[in-house]
Amino acid sequence: MSEIGVFEFQGKRYEFPVEIGSENEIAIDIKKMRSSTGGIITLDPGFKNTGSCKSAITFLDGEKGVLRYRGYALEDLAENAKFLEVAYLVIFGELPTKKELDRFENTIKSYTMLNEEMKDILDGFPKNAHPMGILSSLTGALTAFNPHAVDIHNEEDMYEAICKTMAKIPVIAAWAHSKNLGKPMNYAHNDYDYIENILQMMFMKRNERYTTNKVVAEALDKLLILHIDHEQNCSTSTVRIVGSSHAGLFASISAGVSALWGPLHGGANQAVIEMLEKIIEDGGDVEKYINKAKDKNDPFRLMGFGHRVYKNFDPRALIIKKSADAVLKELDIDDPTLKVAKHLEEVALNDPYFVDRKLFPNVDFYSGIIYRALGIPLEMFTVMFAIGRLPGWIAQWREMRLNGELIGRPRQLYIGKNKRDFKPLEKR
Ligand code: ACO
């Protein structure tokens, strides 16, 4: 195979090096395109064809429905490992030994306290503020309480910053939930593990002893593993690009939370349940909504369907669908939205509109159903996604900084007015 990419324009031939990834992905390196062609740039809105970085964290093959973290199949990790183990793998590159995992867990536990003044900021939010807004703002605010800029080349410093981030963000998430309900804010307790603490902080009543429901904790653990990383998606690219200006970890992650919130990204899990409930309220006519989704004059889209990269099944959706069945059975819950979701999926997967466009259920199609079965309220779905995605954001931020990546600064094709003369106000 030729190892150069050739581009011809106005009779001139330009050659660019080709890079091959470890899974034989091919990329034409156009770093020198602008300088060698006298100013020509590429135009790729939405970055459908643009690799923004080289990364050794996650491999995904959207055509084959493959997703691997650091070389390990997601299915294996979800089946055999715990969330913190996989978080360690994604951040540091290798599965931890028992000693490394204990140290990771204990260091995280040592940082779960938040400055009490954070509560003053929380007090300023209206009671019905969306928890994603609170999570993004308070994550940004952590920068003010932890002004020390991490030295990324100092392993200990970096390790502490990673553990602090892993420790504090679930606390903020739980506080955002308590704020909505007018409940007292709970802290993590070192007797509980990471997942138990998320549940305990959200659901513990001060006047009762808290006991973890194992089915709930295991299901949440698995769900969070599935969300840990997904290479250069919208929120991760946001974290990397904000961090590329050497903004701190908390500031970059706060931006990632905001990016995740949108209904075309992590906000889709909430939007799916809202859609399923609307279909039920409207008499359960699934075909009507399929037709709405196909109608180009109707802005409605089938939420939880389609993906920028997966043009086959989303492997996360397959695991979640199985898990949804099992969790609902174990918790003895009969959720009508699951029935509607399955019906919707069946109709869509047999409809040429969805088949031709390769639109399959994505991770969010079934995750909301499990979250609901676990007792997590609708507004907290995307927050749970953020907790799951946190190790991925940290890993990508760290990799970007350690690779010494340049500040992210795309070009544009200007299509505005040409130079014109200023007209004084009285002549306009
Ligand atoms: N319902 C109906 N039609 C759809 C849907 C959908 N959910 N998704 C895509 N299409 C159609 C588009 O209208 C377009 O049709 P056309 O070729 O006739 O114009 C075609 O499929 C391609 O769609 P694009 O929007 O170009 O695909 P893109 O890769 O830009 O978008 C996205 C991917 C944003 C996920 C899209 O499929 C979507 O909006 N899905 C619903 C929201 C959702 O579930 N988001 C969660 C994604 S997973 C995650 O972020 C964790």
Image (cartoon, grey):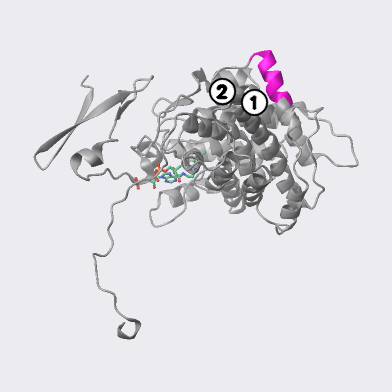
Q: Residue at x 46, y 42 (%)?
A: 241
Amino acid found under the numbered disc labelled 1: Phe
Residue 230 seen in the figure: no
User: 10 Å neighbourhood of mark 2: few (<14), some, or many (≥20)?
Assistant: some
* Quarter of the image where the C terminus is located: bottom left
Foreground: disc 2 or disc 1: 2
| Main SS category, magenta section | helix
Q: Which mark is residue 213?
A: none
Q: Earlier in the sequence, mark 2 or mark 1?
A: 1
Return the residue nearer the eye: 251 or 72.
Answer: 251
Residue 396 colored in magenta in the image: no
Q: Is residue 370 above or below residue 136?
A: above
Q: Position of residue 334 (x, y in %)?
A: 70, 37
Q: Looking at the picture, does residue 42 appear above or below residue 59?
A: below
**Can you give x and y, in whole percent of width and height, for residue 78 in the image?**
60, 22
In the picture of the structure, the residue carrying the numbered disc 1 is 83
- Seen in the picture, residue 324 relative to 250 is either above or below; the reply is above
Gap between marks 2 and 1 measured at Cα: 14 Å
Residue extending farthest to the right is 207
Instruction: Give, as a single range, the part of the protein colored magenta.
Output: 97-106
**How many labels were placed on the picture?**
2
Which residue is at a point 27% across and 58% down the rendered structure image? 415
The location of residue 152, given as percent across then percent down, is: 55, 31
Q: Is residue 114 left or right of residue 20?
A: right
Residue 333 found in image quarter: top right
Q: Would you name the residue on which mark 2 appears?
A: 92
Residue at the image point whose x is 69% and y is 32% from the top:
328
**Label 1 element class:** helix
The disc labelled 2 sits on which kind of residue?
Phe
